[in-house]
Image (tube, helix red, strand yellow):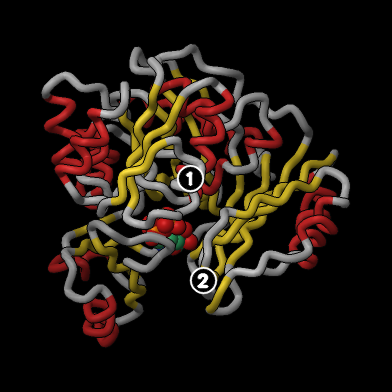
Amino acid sequence: MKTIGIAGGGQLGRMLTDAAHALGFKVVMMDPTPNAPGMQMADERIVAAYGDANATKRLAEKCDVLTFEIESVNADALEELSHNGFPVHPTPRTLAMIKDKLYQKQFLSSHGIPVAPFALPEEAETLGYPYVLKARSGGFDGRGNALVNSPEDIADAVAKLRGAPAYAEGFVHFDKELAIVAVRTAEGDIKIFPLVETIHKNHICHMVLAPAPVSTEIAQRARDLAEIVLASFEGAGVFAIEMFNVGSEVLVNEIAPRVHNSGHFSIEACHTSQFEEHIRAVAGMPLGDPSMKVPAAVMINILGERDGQAMPDGIEDAEKLPGVKVHIYGKTDTRKERKMGHITATADTLDDARSLAEHARSLVSI
Ligand SMILES: Nc1ncnc2c1ncn2[C@@H]1O[C@H](COP(=O)(O)OP(=O)(O)OP(=O)(O)O)[C@@H](O)[C@H]1O
Ligand SMILES: [Mg+2]
């Protein structure tokens, strides 16, 4: 095994490529943007739309194993490759199931995993109000979701989703949002990263606190759920499980079949990062130790604040703070709320890590 093919070349692809290089692999990457963050680091590039079936096959011809960093890759093309014996991880069947949020919810609840009540749009009334109308596929950073507070909101919600196939989900009055990144080998060996709290602003992940400040009971429940979820999937790789904590309960919100924003802290804070674990898993290597090597870490996303050319500034000053590391993804253009980079601060306590990360964030502009 020498070359890893990655479909998708955003920041996740960039950090996967760093990990692959550190383990001695070459990376061939496919993305529509020639200088996308990951494409800048890849050893070989295929410039093509995510859905391009022929380009996906060309990618396979150039590598020993294929993986992906975005759900909008062509699951059918990957399925065909996999059917013909080419290794694709996680399996395209798992990807196809997760890609459709309604199938995903049905899959999770059929495996006994607690999720928010959900229904087809025509039966949404049975959930009561408010509920969330969610596009079945293609949404990210909350863009495929619309809140419905009363029957008067339905038309606007459908319009926001541009009539895309959707389903309805009961609104969860959660106390906290939590997430767990976990990794499995093709043989089913599972390792679980520490539970984190994720704090969203405008439906976009703003901050991640590791370990999550919750009771040991909640942390154990979340870990147990992560284990059940991972055991129910096929293929190798990292999965992220987004969860809601309501009182003493933990519900699964959704699964990502890939490395995830809630696991970026692991680069500095864990013995093995989520990116290294993913490469290890898809390359058939033994997994590393995902536990934390520092008491606490806080990650803050660097989101764009204006539209225009990116002009990263203040990074050196931010990194003068103890335990602070700044990651800039190399995107040419900044846009309001676009993920441009992130900051991780490690410290002895969550409070200290959070203060450091916030201070560092205030010094950086892009
Ligand atoms: N049923 C719900 N009840 C309450 N809040 C919800 C519900 N579903 C989603 N949300 C809120 O909206 C956010 C985004 O929702 P979701 O994870 O479904 O969308 P997404 O577009 O896939 O987001 P991302 O790309 O960030 O994963 C959640 O993190 C949560 O804050
Ligand atoms: Mg989500």
Seen from the viewer's position, the closer of residues 286 and 199 is 286
Q: How far apart are marks 2 and 1 (CA)?
A: 21 Å
Along the line of sight, the residue nearer the viewer: 154 or 241: 241
* 67 lies left or right of 307: left
Q: Where is residue 147, by image quadrant?
A: bottom left
* Residue 137 disc label: none
Q: Looking at the image, is 309 positioned above or below residue 249?
A: below
Q: Which residue is drawn at 20% across and 45% down?
A: 74
Residue at which label 1 appears = 12
| 127 left or right of 237 in image | left
Front residue of 37 and 357: 37
- The disc placed on residue 202 is 2
At label 2, counting other C-alpha atoms closer than 10 Å, the crowd grade (few under 14, some 14-19, many 20 or more) is few
Quadrant the C terminus occupies: bottom right
In the image, what residue type sits under mark 1? Leu
Q: In percent of the image, x 16 and y 19: which residue is there? A: 85
In the image, residue 232 above or below residue 208: above
Query: Can you say which quadrant of the picture contains the N terminus?
Result: top left
- Report if residue 172 is visible in the image: no
Measuring from the top left, give residue 126's x and y in whole percent: 21, 65
Q: Which residue is drawn at 74% across and 62% down?
A: 361
